[in-house]
Image (tube, rainbow, N blue to C red):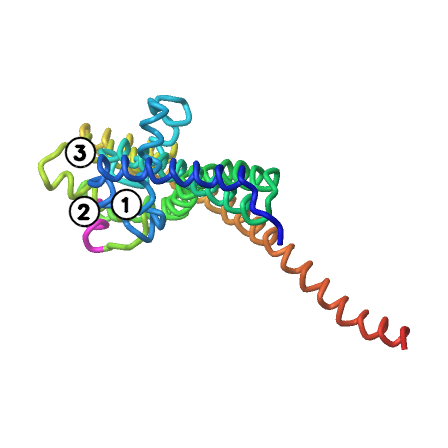
């Protein structure tokens, strides 16, 4: 029986001790941070104290260009007031994954007595897991943008029809938000903007909030037209929105084609696997017959 390496035991003990100390320190200080987090969205929520404590230890300032970009993403995915909170949560999650990866690497080192393999697993997973954690933010925002872009032409068309039928712009927006409710992201954000106005805030504040929550060039232009028309009045909103609508329909067609192309590309690998399986089914009997 192969002897257990003393160095492997020492490394594992050191990593476990560091993990435990960080967990206890973070749990005391950041207990209230964990309560509002959804377990489904943050499956490693119970280990986040490790990441919080590690970020405190290295005294990270959250002021890099990468952080500023992620703040914009978080303002779209969550309430903008809580962007700073969730930025720290995502960094804590990334650091927690790194520590778990180092712990796994130390355990592998102890099991097979190979420091090189343990180091590769620890450093490899310690870099890959945080990368995918932070990359998930960008992917979620891109999906959100795609959903909004697909619905914008329809929303603009409804506004044009309702204003053409005699409703003023704000009345048309209220009608869409209340009587044409949908679980689609764009309609939910419009309904929220209308609720902000109902609560006594200005239209500027409501649609500025909507442009932050839907941080796209098309949405910023749409919100600017809405705010300008509410302030100035007049009937030129229909012509302005028709121009945007034509552009959005063209963009939607291009997006639909791109999504279809991406879907066909994603199907290429499963089709190759199926082809390989068919080849095996055809060739295997022939080969076994030749051997006989």
Tell me residue 144's x, y (percent). 38, 44
Find the magenta span and give its range.
Answer: 173-179
Circle 1: element type: helix
The one nearer the camera, 142 or 123, is 123
Residue found 87% across the figure and 76% down from its top: 289
Structural distance between the alpha carbons of marks 3 and 2? 12 Å
Q: Secondary structure at mark 3?
A: helix
Mark seen at residue 174: 2
Q: Which image quarter is the C terminus in?
A: bottom right
Q: Which residue is mark 3?
A: 203
Query: Dot 1: few (<14), some (14–19), or many (≥20) neighbours within 10 Å?
Result: many
Q: Is residue 166 above or below residue 285?
A: above
Tell me which residue sits at (41%, 23%) in the image. 65
**Which badge, 1 or 3, is on the more N-terminal residue?**
1
Estimate the spatial distance between the alpha carbons at disc 1 and disc 3, rounded to whole Å.
17 Å
Nearer the observer, disc 2 or disc 1? 2
- In the rendered structure, the answer to whether residue 114 lies left or right of residue 46 reads right
Mark 1 highlights which residue?
A: 159
Callout 3 crowding tier (Cα within 10 Å): few <14, some 14–19, many ≥20:
many
Which of the 4 quarters of the picture holds residue 203? top left
């Amino acid at each position: 029986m192969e002897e257990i390496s003393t160095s492997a035991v020492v490394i594992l003990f050191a990593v476990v001790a560091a993990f435990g100390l960080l967990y206890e320190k973070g749990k005391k200080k950041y207990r209230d941070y964990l309560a509002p987090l959804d377990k489904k969205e943050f499956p490693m929520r119970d280990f986040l104290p490790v990441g919080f404590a590690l970020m405190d230890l290295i005294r990270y300032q959250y002021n890099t260009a990468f952080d500023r970009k992620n703040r914009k993403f978080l303002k779209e995915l969550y309430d903008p007031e809580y962007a700073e909170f969730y930025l720290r949560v995502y960094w804590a999650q990334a650091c927690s994954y790194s520590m778990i990866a180092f712990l796994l690497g130390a355990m592998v080192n102890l099991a097979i007595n190979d420091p090189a393999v343990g180091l590769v697993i620890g450093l490899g997973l310690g870099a890959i897991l945080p990368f995918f954690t932070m990359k998930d933010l960008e992917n979620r925002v891109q999906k959100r943008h795609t959903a909004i872009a697909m619905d914008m032409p329809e929303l603009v068309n409804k506004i044009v029809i309702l204003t053409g039928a005699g409703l003023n712009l704000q009345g048309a927006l209220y009608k869409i938000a209340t009587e044409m409710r949908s679980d689609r992201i764009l309609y939910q954000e419009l309904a929220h903007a209308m609720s902000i106005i109902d609560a006594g805030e200005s239209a500027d504040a409501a649609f500025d909030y909507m442009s932050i929550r839907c941080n796209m060039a098309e949405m910023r232009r749409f919100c600017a037209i809405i705010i300008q028309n509410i302030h100035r009045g007049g009937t030129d909103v229909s012509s302005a929105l028709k121009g945007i609508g034509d552009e959005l329909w063209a963009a939607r067609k291009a997006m639909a084609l791109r999504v279809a192309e991406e879907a066909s590309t994603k199907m290429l690998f499963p089709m190759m696997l199926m082809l390989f399986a068919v080849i095996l089914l055809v060739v295997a009997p022939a080969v076994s017959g030749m051997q006989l």
